[in-house]
Amino acid sequence: MPVLHRPRRHARIVTARRRGTVYACPDDVRRCREQRPAGPVRTCVGCRTRAAASGLLRVVAVEGILVPDPRRRHPGRGAWLHPDLGCLRLAERRRAFPRALRSRVELDTAAVHAFLT
Ligand SMILES: [Zn+2]
């Protein structure tokens, strides 16, 4: 059950700066947190749609090979992709991986293909 918050008549005016927004009181801060999507949001390099990072697969480049990183433990720059062959093919076609990962060489996507099938 959510806790009901009655506005206090003498509520202290508090300003909180978060992502450029100034809230008038703590209740406003709480309301805005509830409206924000849960967790970080990333853009799929295949279909370019924004989605919760938890629903996307992180991939990293290791010595010219694109490696799936489902546990997100690999250091360095990562690219985000829907765990979907269609998005993988789209990303390949637009050469999104070398661009997103700042790689000057073509990346071998076989390991990601294998991961998704
Ligand atoms: Zn996608």
Image (tube, rainbow, N blue to C red):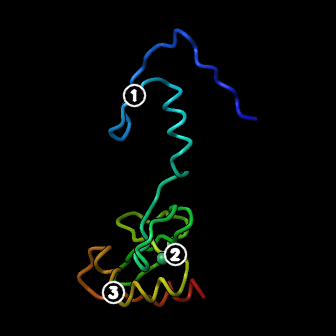
**Ligand 1 contact, mark 2 (Cβ < 8 Å):** yes
| Element class at badge 2 | loop
Q: Quadrant of residue 23?
A: top left
What is the CA distance from the residue labelled 1 to the residue labelled 3?
42 Å
Mark found first going from the N terminus, 2 or 3 = 2
Q: Of marks 1 and 3, which one's residue comes earlier in the chain? A: 1
> The disc labelled 2 sits on which kind of residue?
His
- On residue 82, the disc is 2
Q: Amino acid at mark 3?
A: Arg
Residue 7: x and y in percent read 58, 19
Left or right, 63 with respect to 55, comes to left
- Residue hosting label 1: 16
Assess disc 1: are there few (<14), some (14-19) or many (≥20) residues with their C-alpha within 10 Å of its C-alpha: some
Three-letter code for the amino acid on which mark 1 is drawn: Ala
How many C-alpha atoms fall within 10 Å of the one at disc 2: few (<14), some, or many (≥20)? many
Q: Which residue is mark 3?
A: 94
**Residue 65, relative to residue 34: is it above or below?**
below
Quadrant housing residue 98? bottom left
